[in-house]
Each structure stands twice: as structure tokens, then as C-alpha cells.
Amino acid sequence: MARIDAFLKLGLAQGCSDVHLAVGVPPMLRMNGDLLPIKFRELSDNELTAYIEEILTSKQRERLAGGHDLDFSYVTGEGGRFRVNVFRKVTGIGAVLRHIPGNVPSLDQLNVPPILKKFCEYHQGMVLVTGATGTGKSTTLAAMIDHINSSRAHNIITLEDPIEFVHPSKQSQIIQREVGTHLPSFAAGIRSSMREDPDVILVGEMRDAETIMMAMTAAETGHLVFGTLHTTGAVKTIDRVIDALPGELREQTKAFLAMSLKAVITQVLVKTPDGRGRRAVQEILVNNRAIANMIQSEQTHQIGSQLQTGRNEGMQLMDAALLDAIQAKEIDPDDAFRFANDKSKFQRYVSDVELVPPMDGASEGGA
């Protein structure tokens, strides 16, 4: 058993999401959003390098020695599965290991809005799940893929870096491919997938212009494409896609988004009231004629008003979703305040007065 497994076993026992290993500090656990050290000595460069090299292949050791970061999946001796990123920094080597649950959660277990099941029923087009790193995008997408897998006879191809949740084929056939292991890039994977009779293609990360262009082509040619972007709102997601492609393709990109973009889900993870867990809260855009016109006319700044008035279509702004979850006592108001855009709406729910900026003149004593 690799020595690093002891830290991972401890992390799993504590219910952490990530284990952080870095030179000069003890191992640390991400617990419900907070980073906490464990009772252990500070790790030296030689010690940590030895721990990490025990779980690397010879090819991975060569890449790391050549100055490259590593992304891969690791299964402990006891069967725990982790997504691993290994890197070098000023003080030496470092690694972050994120736990991947053995069972894919259902959409019902995640307590997400019912509209997400409808997104799984589309036959073509693009659905984007967005948010910052560590907001649960992969988990939401895995649950959506599992919903299709459990209810429809489709050929589903996932392109991941690395593979996280492992999906057994149920009603559908699922083919999971890993960038760096089975494919040189996401773009190459999409190109190959379109020759493999897919119904659904999952693109783990739309990180460059070529991948975005290939994903758009797949969505336009009769496939349902799921993808992720590191954007923090529906409007920012649309602007990011348009800006990511060369200027001469701007009109073509706007036309694609107006016609083939089906939905954008942007999510954050907010602590539960007891502080013992986190819950996904989501902003949801459902493309309709009004939003399509705004995209075509480059009036995306007006899309927020459509999300506000489109609740009967399943749409919601992030602030509205946060307020609903606070009122349902599903999330901690203080943590929700950090994610709110218009924080004035949330001040009356906040219990930590240090979070709320002082009123004008509040710091001055009375005469």
C-alpha cells in the first residue's frame, strides 16, 4: 500500500472533499469548504516527493521531471477513488487529491431543480454546466449522464481529464475516454466521437477555441453535447464562448448560440445551516426566443431580466435561488451572503455582523 493512502484514508473518514499536500506544512483537508491541517509534521520536499512518486507510472515521473503538471485518477489499496493534480511550486512539489464517490448520485439526491431532468431529454444542442473550480460541476454532470443512462437507450461518450465517476452501462452504452491516456486532446476526442455513432457527448472541459468549435459542430450536427466552462454566470458564459473564438467567427458563433445553446447551469456550493455539508445552488438559463434575439443583437447584458421573469420556464437568477434556499433553511445565510451579487437583499439574514459593510456614518460616534 502506498504511504499516501494513510492520508487519504484519514480524509475519507473525516468526510473531506480534498486532501492537500505541500512542502513546509502538514497535510490539510478541505472540510465543507474550509482548509484544515491534520496533526502531522510539516512535509519536506524529499519526503513528499517520495510519497507522490509511489503512485506515479514511469511515464508520469518523466513528465513531472520535465516540468509538467500531472492530472490523473488514483485508486487506493482500499478502493477509494481520487482525482489527482501534481505540480511544482517555489518550495517544491505539491498535490491535491479530490475524492470521487464510488456511486454516482442521482439528480434527486443532489436536490437540484427539476428542469435539469428536462435538459437530459433533449435530442441535440448544447447544455453547459459552469462555475468556479470545486463547485461540483463534475458531480452534476455525472448525475445528468446517469439519468440518461438509466432511462434511455443511447450511445454516450464521455471525454474527461481525468476520468472521475465510473459509469456502468445501464439502459445506455457508456464509453469513457481519458485525455492523455486514450486521446491527445478534447478536440481530438470530439472529432473521433462523431465517427462513433454517439447520441450524447460529454466534454469534460471546453478550455480552448478548438475544443469549443468542435463541440459546437457536434451540437449542430444532431448530437446532445454537455460541457463545462469556468465561468460564474449565464451571461459571462455566453460572452466567454463568443470571445474565445476568432473575430471572423463572431457572427457564426452568435448564430450557433442563438439556435443550438439549450441551457446554461451555473452553480456554487453553499454550506448547510449545521455547517456539516454543502448544497449546490444554481442559476439557470433556458434559451428561448427572447434570449436568442439578445445573443444575436449582442444585448447579453439584458439576459438577467429574462432569467428573473422566466421562472415559469425553469429559469432563475443566482440571487433568487440563494434567497429561496435560505428561506427553506437549506443553506447557511452567512455563507450565502458571500456568493450573492446584490448583497443588500441578504443583509437581514446575516448573523455575522462582520460580513455586512457599515452604514455611512455608522463608525462615527453620536454628538
Image (cartoon, grey):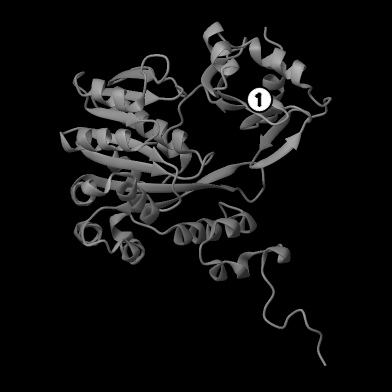
Report the residue at 48% width, 61% height from top: 319
Q: Is residue 32 left or right of residue 305?
A: right
Q: Quadrant of the N terminus?
A: top right
Q: Find disc 1 in the rendering and name its residue.
A: 12
In the displayed image of the protein, which residue is found farthest to the left? 221
Q: Helix or strand or loop: what does disc 1 sit on?
A: helix
Q: Is residue 268 left or right of residue 113?
A: right
Residue 204 position in % (x across, y down)? 39, 31
Up-down relation of residue 6 to residue 255 (above or below):
above
Count of numbered labels shown in the rendering: 1
Say few, some or many: other residues with alpha carbon within 10 Å of mark 1 (under 14 / 14 to 19 / 20 or more): some
Q: Is residue 340 visible?
A: yes
Q: Quadrant of residue 209?
A: top left
Relative to the observer, which residue lies in front, 46 or 112?
A: 46
Q: Is residue 122 visible?
A: no
Report the residue at 31% width, 61% height from top: 300
Q: Check disc 1 and give the amino acid type.
A: Leu
Relative to the observer, which residue lies in front, 223 or 247?
A: 247
Report the residue at 41% width, 30% height from top: 142
Residue 134 position in % (x across, y down)? 54, 39
Q: Quadrant of the C terminus?
A: bottom right
Q: Is residue 91 left or right of residue 146?
A: right
Residue 52 position in % (x across, y down)? 66, 16
Up-down relation of residue 253 to residue 318 (above or below):
above
Report the residue at 51% width, 48% height from top: 268
Q: Quadrant of residue 130?
A: top left
